[in-house]
């Protein structure tokens, strides 16, 4: 591996993370709170260290090539260092004292997980509170570019799905150049955020809160500025708006640009993943609604629809907002929420988890396998649209699926050593790995992760990172072969 | 008309043959010495041995100013190149045979909205054959069907059912539904233009014409039962199979393809969605039974091997498959084939010839189709010559050459199936049935 080029780039990324700490500092300045010092010092340390890396590891002319290995290392170290340095504002401001807590909170932010150890969010200073939400937005943005740039080589399937879908349905990537494609995705991301901010402002939310919640919703994170999350705003308008935007953020971002360019919605209704996503969301909402309406008829028709839609979408897009404590819901609806946690939304969006595209391919492959049993000599190809999915990729996806479930189970066992109940252990491991955030039981939507011991907090942080970077990006780094010359 | 044919393969040969028999001035350019020799012996055409895409050779063939240039060798790229060169040498119309789906003419037209490299007609024999077969599959009760006057008139070709009541009854006593015409019978490879005293015999092939909306009465009269085709098996995975499967797949018909070459199977599986592709030998009887091919509603034998096609069709007919189409490339087999009970034959070669002939027909001719191989022709023409001698006369008084029947007249959106007292008027569209040797005379009569 070419260490120079890796840390050169990581240094650059870290500098950008440091610079972005200046944005919450503006809010501190505006409110005149003391956390401005913490943010400024954090900025100096982070950017300073970033620049140090950047200049110390200046690659020579012939060394500036990035291959697989370098790609994995850049991604993993960027997330790792961003999460570590992202703790500085929390610690320096004194808002979070325990280092494990700070790491958990920061990782949860950058991985757009949205689980928290904070018992009282509203006690945070405004700059810190803003920084917390901003980490989501940066993480989401990072995932978008990472997605097209680097995950393509891990072969874990996510990108191939995206590629397969987009080459057949959208004009051949969005643009020929990767950097152009990244710009379009970012633009989409920024526009969605701006729209949401405006709509939230129109609903009477303050500018500060609108920004924070928009960052959180579009990045499918889950951090709120209120202890009661979106439930604080007792407004069905705000809840519906956030529901819709969470749904939109769960769609492949590459589908938006063709709509703008071709002035039609062909890219959507021709996209098999989008259709399956919509179907699963619709079925989950309907099921949840029927049960909720029978259990809580006193809540009325519309409120039950809203509650079902909001929470189903919040979980399936791995956001993790809540307006009510679904811990108190009937068992069947909690099972639905638990299951859709492992489905996730579309590839090419900011969501975590296994993602619909992989399920789509596995379902299609299954039907081909059944055909092979009935007709032993049949020759078939799994296809999405016009694009043939090669066997190698199917194998990759199966591998990913297996590792995802395997890591989930092992993790549930590991964290249960701390004597926590079954549901909590399972959902804490699941919600961290899938980047959803809140789970059930003692990590339910109205609870926090503060009662875990330091080891578990660190371990869950690692799980978030693992899930966010689609397992293999991180796992290859743990393989000694990777480090050999 | 001065015609240049590049390539004297099966298609080139038959085109040269037809065109020279229609008194056109044909020059054939063929690269192979032996093949050239065969042509010189058999046909009354000028043969030049050489590369048909080379300027000096084309100069030699006197291409400059030719009316028609047909590039029909095996090689797509070569045909395209030769046509482009010919176009640059002031040929009026160029036709190229292009079979690779990657060069699909229709797609290029969609993208560029221009004629592909200036070539006037790109003909894909396999695609033409696939379209033809799919048409036949859609009317399983008939042997063939052709449409005229924007689909308002059709001629159908069929074998009457066993339960048909009027075998051996003179036609004049036959209660044929009104406005339907029996135009010809095919018996022992001979076309019979029936008069009132002729009779329909068992195993005759009947050609009849009627308005499309009345066709039901006609098929009812002959006891032809409409049958829905749900399962079609294609034997062989060549290009015709691919195109055909793609058409049938869109019609929601279950299609199964059996092909021996695993690479071809892979390729098919990549490009088709709901088609079952089985890798195996079409002559493997156990495989055919295992895959339930004998239960198919329709089988189409499309391998590259005529003998294998015949064998498999015969075998499956024996197992009880009722409807079949068999691809036969060698025309010398044709007379034998009906004798052994294979009734539906398709030959991409003759379809290609038909398509090219259709293309070069004069402007007043709307369409031309060949019946029963090329034993008879259906011609749709517009009467746009005021001085034409046949106008405004009762049909019975017109002295048509023997074998010509006016099947239908389209006048101001009305469809008339004429009787002896009807007259032809200026501007009418008429559908004519005739024997091929009448073509010249008819052209003269129509002016």
Image: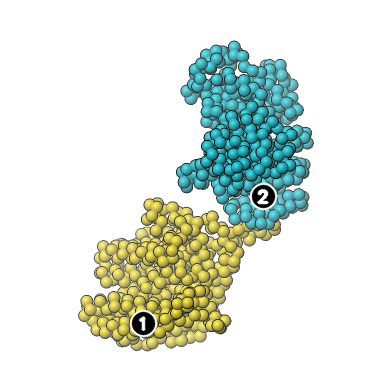
Chain colours: A yellow, B cyan
Q: Nearer the viewer, mark 1 or mark 2?
A: 1
SS category of the residue bearing label 1: helix
Q: Nearer the viewer, residue A82 or A180?
A: A180
Q: Nearer the viewer, residue A244 or B188?
A: B188
Name the residue: 53% across, 83% down: A483
* C-alpha span from label 1 to label 2: 63 Å
Q: Quadrant of residue B67?
A: top right
Quarter of the figure with the N terminus of chain B: top right
Quarter of the figure with the C terminus of chain B: top right
Q: Nearer the viewer, residue A454 or A90?
A: A90
Q: Where is residue B12 shown, x and y percent of the image?
A: 66, 38
Q: Which residue is mark 1?
A: A51
Q: Quadrant of residue A233?
A: bottom left
Q: Which residue is mark 2?
A: B237
Q: Where is residue A268 shown, x and y percent of the image?
A: 44, 56
Name the residue: 71% across, 36% down: B39
Q: Where is residue A176 shown, x and y percent of the image?
A: 45, 61
Q: Chain of mark 1?
A: A
User: What crowding class fits label 1: few (fewer than 14 Cα within 10 Å), some (14-19), or many (20 or more)?
Assistant: many
Q: Where is residue A188 shown, x and y percent of the image?
A: 37, 63
In the image, is A89 to the left or to the right of A405?
left
Q: Is residue B370 above or below residue B251?
A: above
In the image, is A360 to the left or to the right of A253?
right
Q: Chain of mark 2?
A: B
Q: Is residue A362 visible?
A: yes
Label number found at residue A479: none
Name the residue: 51% across, 16% down: B387
Q: Nearer the viewer, residue A313 or A159?
A: A159
């Amino acid at each position: 591996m070419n260490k120079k080029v890796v840390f050169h780039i990581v240094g650059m990324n870290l500098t950008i993370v440091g610079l972005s700490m200046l944005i919450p500092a503006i809010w501190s300045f505006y409110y005149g709170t003391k956390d401005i010092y913490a943010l400024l010092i954090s900025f100096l340390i982070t950017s300073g260290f970033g620049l140090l890396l950047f200049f110390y590891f200046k690659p020579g002319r012939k060394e500036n090539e990035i291959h697989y290995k370098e790609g994995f290392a850049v991604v993993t170290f960027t997330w790792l260092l961003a999460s570590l340095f992202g703790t500085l504002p929390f610690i320096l401001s004194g808002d979070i004292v325990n280092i494990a807590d700070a790491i958990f909170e920061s990782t949860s932010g950058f991985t757009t997980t949205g689980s928290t150890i904070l018992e009282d969010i509203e006690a945070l200073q405004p700059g810190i509170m803003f920084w917390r939400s901003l980490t989501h937005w940066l993480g989401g943005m990072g995932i978008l570019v990472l997605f097209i740039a680097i995950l393509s080589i891990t072969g874990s399937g996510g990108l191939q799905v995206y590629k397969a879908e987009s080459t057949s349905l959208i004009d051949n990537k969005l643009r020929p150049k990767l950097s152009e494609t990244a710009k379009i995705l970012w633009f989409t991301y920024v526009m969605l955020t701006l729209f949401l901010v405006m709509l939230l402002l129109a609903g009477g939310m303050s500018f500060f809160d609108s920004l924070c919640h928009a960052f959180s919703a579009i990045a499918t994170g889950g951090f709120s500025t209120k202890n009661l999350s979106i439930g604080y705003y007792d407004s069905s308008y705000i809840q519906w708006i956030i529901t819709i935007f969470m749904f939109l953020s769960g769609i492949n971002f590459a589908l938006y640009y063709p709509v703008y360019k071709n002035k039609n919605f062909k890219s959507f209704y021709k996209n098999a993943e989008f259709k399956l996503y919509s179907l699963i969301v619709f079925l989950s909402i309907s099921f949840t609604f029927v049960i909720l309406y029978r259990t809580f008829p006193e809540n009325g028709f519309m409120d039950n629809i809203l509650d079902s839609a909001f929470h189903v979408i919040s979980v399936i897009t791995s956001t993790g907002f809540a307006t009510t404590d679904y811990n108190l819901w009937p068992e069947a609806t909690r099972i639905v929420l638990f299951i859709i946690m492992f489905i996730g939304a579309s590839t090419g969006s900011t969501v975590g988890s296994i993602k619909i595209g992989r399920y789509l391919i596995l379902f299609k492959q299954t039907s081909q396998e059944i055909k092979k049993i009935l007709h032993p000599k049949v020759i078939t190809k799994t296809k999405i649209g016009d694009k043939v999915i090669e066997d190698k990729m199917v194998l990759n996806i199966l591998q990913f699926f297996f590792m995802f479930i395997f890591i989930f189970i092992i993790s549930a066992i590991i964290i249960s050593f701390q004597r926590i109940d079954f549901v909590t252990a399972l959902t804490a491991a699941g919600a961290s790995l899938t980047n959803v955030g809140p789970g059930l039981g003692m990590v339910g939507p109205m609870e926090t992760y503060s009662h875990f011991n330091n080891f578990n907090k660190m371990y869950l942080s690692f799980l978030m990172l693992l899930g966010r970077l689609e397992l293999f990006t991180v796992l290859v780094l743990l393989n000694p072969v990777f480090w050999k010359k | 008309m001065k015609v240049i044919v590049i390539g004297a393969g099966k298609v080139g040969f038959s085109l040269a043959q037809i065109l020279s028999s229609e008194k056109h001035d044909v020059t054939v350019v063929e690269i192979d010495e032996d093949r050239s020799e065969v042509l010189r012996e058999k046909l009354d055409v000028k043969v030049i041995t050489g590369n048909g895409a080379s300027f000096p050779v084309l100069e030699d063939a006197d291409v400059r100013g030719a009316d028609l240039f047909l590039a029909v060798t095996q090689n797509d790229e070569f045909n395209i190149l030769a046509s482009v060169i010919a176009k640059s040498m002031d040929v009026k119309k160029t036709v190229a045979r292009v079979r690779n789906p990657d060069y699909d003419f229709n797609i290029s037209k969609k993208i560029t909205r221009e004629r592909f490299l200036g070539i006037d007609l790109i003909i894909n024999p396999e695609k033409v054959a696939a379209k033809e077969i799919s048409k036949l599959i859609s009317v399983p009760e008939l042997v063939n069907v052709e449409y005229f006057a924007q689909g308002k008139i059709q001629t159908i070709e069929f074998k009457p059912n066993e339960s048909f009541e009027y075998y051996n009854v003179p036609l004049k006593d036959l209660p044929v539904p009104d406005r339907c015409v029996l135009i010809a019978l095919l018996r022992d490879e001979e076309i019979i233009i029936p008069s009132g005293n002729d009779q329909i015999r068992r195993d005759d092939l009947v050609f009849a014409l009627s308005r499309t909306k009345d066709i039901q009465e006609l098929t009812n009269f002959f006891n032809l039962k409409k049958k829905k085709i749900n399962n079609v098996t294609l034997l062989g995975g060549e290009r015709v199979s691919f195109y055909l499967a793609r058409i049938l797949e869109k019609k929601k018909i279950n299609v199964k393809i059996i092909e021996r070459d695993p690479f071809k199977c892979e390729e098919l599986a990549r490009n088709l969605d709901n088609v079952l592709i089985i890798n195996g030998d079409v002559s493997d009887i156990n495989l055919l039974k295992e895959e339930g091919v004998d239960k198919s509603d329709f089988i189409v034998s499309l391998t590259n091997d005529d003998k294998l096609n015949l064998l498999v069709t015969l075998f499956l007919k024996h197992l009880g498959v009722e409807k079949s189409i068999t691809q036969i490339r060698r025309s010398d087999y044709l007379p034998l084939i009906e004798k052994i009970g294979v009734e539906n034959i398709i030959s991409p070669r003759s379809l290609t010839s038909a398509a090219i002939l259709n293309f070069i027909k004069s402007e007043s001719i709307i369409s031309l189709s060949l019946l029963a191989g090329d034993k008879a022709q259906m011609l749709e023409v517009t009467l746009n010559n005021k001085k034409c001698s046949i106008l405004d006369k009762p049909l019975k008084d017109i002295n048509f050459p023997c074998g010509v029947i006016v099947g239908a007249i389209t006048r101001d959106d009305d469809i008339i199936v004429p009787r002896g007292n009807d007259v032809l008027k200026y501007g009418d569209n008429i559908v004519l049935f005739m024997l091929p040797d009448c073509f010249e005379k008819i052209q003269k009569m129509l002016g």
